Image (cartoon, rainbow, N blue to C red):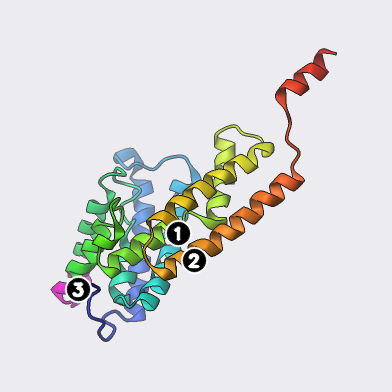
């Protein structure tokens, strides 16, 4: 069950301050790289990309929360903080570390009820949960579903196009890279629980399949064996 919906606890001014804090924290994580931070050279591990992902998850999770009857304040605050420690902690530990940072911020920057802080931190701590999403509160589930949805669709395709360069691939491999997004999308649809998230997922997958079809139609596939034969003649 979700948390009972009450009057907004977080003003837009307070939420904007949270956004500023998270972005500054991500930037500081990159700057601390030489002191133990784990900033990697892929562009999607930059502060800019990570913050953009966080904002996407905020928007998606709010939509899911509103339509599914979850507490929107808990959902959007947990969404803005969910990856705050992503650039300085290991993948396995960043949710727990993020929950610690979240609790410190909420305890020091406002007069939020302890139950609210506990619920937000619980969602941050469980946002990478790999089990059945029906086991989670509506708020945490909304966050997890939003996090999964941001990895599919045209955003997922764009990231795969970036990855091509780092894998030393050429443009004729683009359709294969899009297939990875489709495979991920199928897995996401299998995991998500809410009707809202499922509708968003199907809409995004439709766009990805269009891109895959266009690539197949417009990008000629080179057969390395045939090319080698031509060069030998």
Given residues 118 and 10, the one toward you in this image is 118
Q: What mark, if any, has residue 116 been given in the picture? A: 3
Labelled pair 1, 3 in contact (Cβ < 8 Å): no
**Neighbour class for label 3 at 10 Å: few (<14), some, many (≥20)?**
some
Residue 218 place in picture, x, y as percent = 76, 46
In the displayed structure image, the side of residue 65 where residue 225 appears, left or right = right
**Neighbour class for label 2 at 10 Å: few (<14), some, many (≥20)?**
some
Residue 59 place in picture, x, y as percent = 44, 69
Mark pair 1, 3: CA separation: 25 Å
Residue 57 belongs to magenta span: no
Mark pair 3, 2: CA separation: 28 Å
Q: Which residues are magenta?
A: 105-116
Mark 1 highlights which residue? 149
Task: Determine the residue positioned at 43% across, 64% down.
Answer: 55
Nearer to us of marks 3 and 2 is: 2
Task: Determine the residue positioned at 48% across, 67% down.
Answer: 199
Labelled pair 1, 2 in contact (Cβ < 8 Å): yes
Mark 2 highlights which residue? 200
Q: What mark, if any, has residue 122 been given in the picture? A: none
In the displayed structure image, the side of residue 146 where residue 222 appears, left or right = right
């Amino acid at each position: 069950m979700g948390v009972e919906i009450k009057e907004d606890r977080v003003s837009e001014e307070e939420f904007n301050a949270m956004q500023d804090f998270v972005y500054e924290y991500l930037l500081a994580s990159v700057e601390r790289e030489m002191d133990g931070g784990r900033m990697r050279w892929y562009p999607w591990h930059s502060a800019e990309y990570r913050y953009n992902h966080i904002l996407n998850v905020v928007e998606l999770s709010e939509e899911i929360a509103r339509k599914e009857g979850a507490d929107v304040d808990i959902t959007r605050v947990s969404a803005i903080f969910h990856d705050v420690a992503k650039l300085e902690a290991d993948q396995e530990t960043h949710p727990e570390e993020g929950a610690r940072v979240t609790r410190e911020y909420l305890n020091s920057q406002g007069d939020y009820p302890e139950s609210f802080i506990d619920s937000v931190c619980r969602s941050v701590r469980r946002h990478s949960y790999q089990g059945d999403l029906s086991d989670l509160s509506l708020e945490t589930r909304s966050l997890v579903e939003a996090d999964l949805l941001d990895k599919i669709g045209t955003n997922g395709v764009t990231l795969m196009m970036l990855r091509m360069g780092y894998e030393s691939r050429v443009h004729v491999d683009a359709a294969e890279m899009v297939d990875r997004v489709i495979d991920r999308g199928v897995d996401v649809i299998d995991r998500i629980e809410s009707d809202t998230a499922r509708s968003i997922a199907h809409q995004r997958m439709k766009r990805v399949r269009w891109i895959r079809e266009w690539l197949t139609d417009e990008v000629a596939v080179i057969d390395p064996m045939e090319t080698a034969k031509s060069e030998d003649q």
